Image (tube, grey):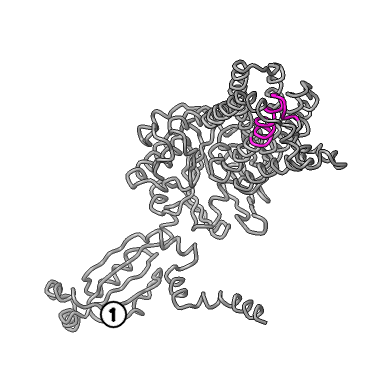
Amino acid sequence: MLETTRFESERLAPAAAVIGLGLAAFGGMMTLIAPGILGDVDMAALLEQFPAPMVEEMGLGKMGTIEGFIALELYEYVWLLGLGAYVAYTAAGFIAGDVETGRMDTLLAAPISRWRLLVEKYLALLTPIVVVNVVVFAGVAGAVQVIDETIPLADLVAVHVLSVPYLLACGAFGMLASVAAPRRIVAEGVAAGTLIGAFLFEMLVTNTNLGWLGAITPMRYYDPLTILTEGTYDAAGGAILFAAAVVLLVGSAWLFGEVDVQ
Amino acid sequence: MAPIHTDGLTKYYGDVRGVEDLSFAVEEGEVFGFLGPNGAGKTTTIRTLMGFMSPTEGTATVLGADIRDAVALRSVRGNVGYLPSEPSFNENVTGRRLLEYHGSLRGDVRSDELLELFDPPLDRKVREYSRGNKQMLAIVVAFMHDPDVLIMDEPTSGLDPLKQEQLLEFIRTEQGRGKTFFFSSHILSEVRKVCDRVAIIRDGHLVELEDVESLLDRSGKVVRARLGGEFDPDSLALEGVHDIEVSGDGGEGDDESGDRSDSGDSDGSGDAAAAKGEATSVTFTYTGAYEPLLRHLLEYDIFDLSIEEAPLEDVFMRFYGENPAKRVEAVENGEIEEYESDEPTDSAEEADA
C-alpha cells in the first residue's frame, strides 16, 4: 500500500525541507522585526503615499498591526501565490513527466491501476504541504514567543490548517493539467500560470461589481489576512476547497484511465 | 489458450496508421520474434498489447485478458514481464531504491539471482548510468516477479555483445522453464539464435508468419563458385537457380592453375584458359537439391565452391521490400530530392506573386 506515495514523497522531501526552513527563517525574521518597524514607521502616513486602490486591493490597510504585517509579508503572497503555484507545478510534473520520459511504461506494466497510481502520486504532495506548514508554523510561533507582542496561537494554527485544503485543491488542479496536457512543460506552465492568473484575477475583481466572478478562484475560500487580523475562520471555504480537490482528482483519474499513454 | 492472441488488432494515431489488422497467436512456451524495420509498428503493437493504448479496432488477449478491459488486464499483469525499448527511470534515485520500489509494485522473487547475470551499479544514481546499465536494470525489473509471459521491445539494445549473448542464453533457459516470449527486434542474428517463429511486419501489416527454419529453407542457399573456362550463364538453367551474377576473374586463378592442370579431366582449351587465368566467378541463389547442381558444376573446373545458407538479411530485405542500396543511389542522384522539392518551389512562387 502506498508504495508510490512513499517513493514520490522521498523525492519531494529534500525540496520541502529547504523551502520550509527558508520560509521559516523568513517568517521568523519578519516576526522579530515587525514590532520595531511598526513602532518606527507611521504606517497610516506611509499608506497615504500609495494609491488608494492599491491599498484597498492588496489589503495594506491591515498592515499596521502585527497580525496584519505577518499575514501580508508571509501568508498572503507566499502561501496563496508561491506555495499554491509550487504545489500545482509539482503535481503537473507527476503524470506528464513520467509519460514524457517513458517512465510511465514501467509503472503501468505493474499490476496497479492508473487511478491508484495517480492518487498515490497526488498524496505524495502532502509531504511538502505538511512539512512546510509545520516548519514555518514552528518558526513563526517561536519568534512570537520572543517579541513583546503576541499573535493568538489559535489563529496561527488556523492559518496553517486551513491552507491544507487550499494547497490540496491547487495540487488537484495540477494533476488535471498533468493528465490533460500533451507535454510536461505545458502541464507545468498551465498549472502554475493558472494559479498566478487566478490570484491576480481575484485581487482585481474583489472590490468591483464583478466580485462574484472571483468565486471560481481558490483564493476566495482561504484568506490568511482575515484569519489573522479578525480571528474568523472560513471553515465552509475549507470544505469547498476540499470538495473541489476531490472533484478535480476524480476527474483527472477518470481522464487518465481513458487516454492513450504515448 | 495461447498466452498472447491478437485478432484484427488495429491502431491508428488520428489518421496515421500504427498497425492494421494484425492477427497472430503466440503459443505457450515459445519464443516469438516480431520483426520489422524502424517505424513498421512493432512498438505500437507491443504498447497496445500492454494496454498503454487502446486499439482502434480489433482486439487482443494477454493470458486470456482482453486488452480493452483494464481491470482484467491488471489482474494478469502480475504474470507479465515488460521490457520497454528505451527504459527510463527517475534519474535522482539509486538503482537499489528503484528495484525496491518496482519490486513492491509487482513482487520480487528473484532479483538477487538476476543481479548475478545483469549487474547495474545499484548503489549509484540512475543519472550516472550508461544506456547498458539502464537496460540491465530494466531487465531485472522485467523478470523479478518471475512472470510466465515476457513482452520485450528490442531487448538487447544498449547491451554490450557479451551481455547480449548472456540475455539470449537466459531467454533460452527461461524458455526451458516454460516461459513464453514475445519480442521485437531488427537484429537478425539474435532472432536466428533464439526464436522459434517470427512474424514480419512492414508498414503496419503482417507480411509473414513462419518458423525460422522453414523461412531459411525456403530462402535457399547462396552458391559461390569460381569456375575455369568459358562459362555460359544460360547453361546453368537448372530449376531453382535465381539471381545469377557472373563476373570475370583473374589474378588468383594463376596461382592455382598448376593444381588444376594436374586433374587432367578437362579438355585442352579448359586447361589453357585456366592457365591464362580465365576463370569465372558465379554467384546465385539455389533452392533445389544438391545433386543436380553438383553434377552440373562438375562439367567445369571448380577452383572454388561454397554453398551456404542465405543470410537472413537477404530474406528480410525481400519482405521489407526496399533495397537500401537503390534508395541511397536514388537520393545521391537527386531523384528523390527533386521529386520532394517540387512543392516548396511552388509555394515560394505563390508567395512571390
Instruction: Tell me which residue sits at (64%, 45%) in the image.
Output: A187
Q: Position of residue A30 (x, y in %)?
A: 61, 27
For the stretch drawn in magenta, the main secondary structure is: helix
- Pick whichever, B62 or B348, lies toward us: B348
Q: Is residue B42 left or right of residue A78?
A: left
Magenta-drawn stretch contains B246: no
The region drawn magenta spans A62-82
Query: Where A109 falls versus A67 (above or below)?
Result: below
Q: Position of residue A194 (x, y in %)?
A: 70, 43
Instruction: Tell me which residue sits at (53%, 45%) in the image.
Output: A101
Q: Residues within 10 Å of mark 1 (few under 14, many from 20)?
A: some
Residue ranking furthest to the right = A209
Q: Quadrant of residue A26?
A: top right
- Pick whichever, A4 or B14, lies toward us: A4
Q: Position of residue B292 (x, y in %)?
A: 33, 68
Quadrant, the N terminus of chain B: top right
- Residue where numbered disc 1 is placed: B231
Q: Quadrant of residue B172?
A: top left
Subunit of label 1? B
Instruction: Tell me which residue sits at (27%, 70%) in the image.
Output: B225
Q: Position of residue B293 (x, y in %)?
A: 32, 68
Residue A4 visible in the snapshot: no
Residue B134 visible in the snapshot: yes
Q: In the rendered picture of this protein, how many numbered marks are placed on residues?
A: 1
Callout 1: SS? loop
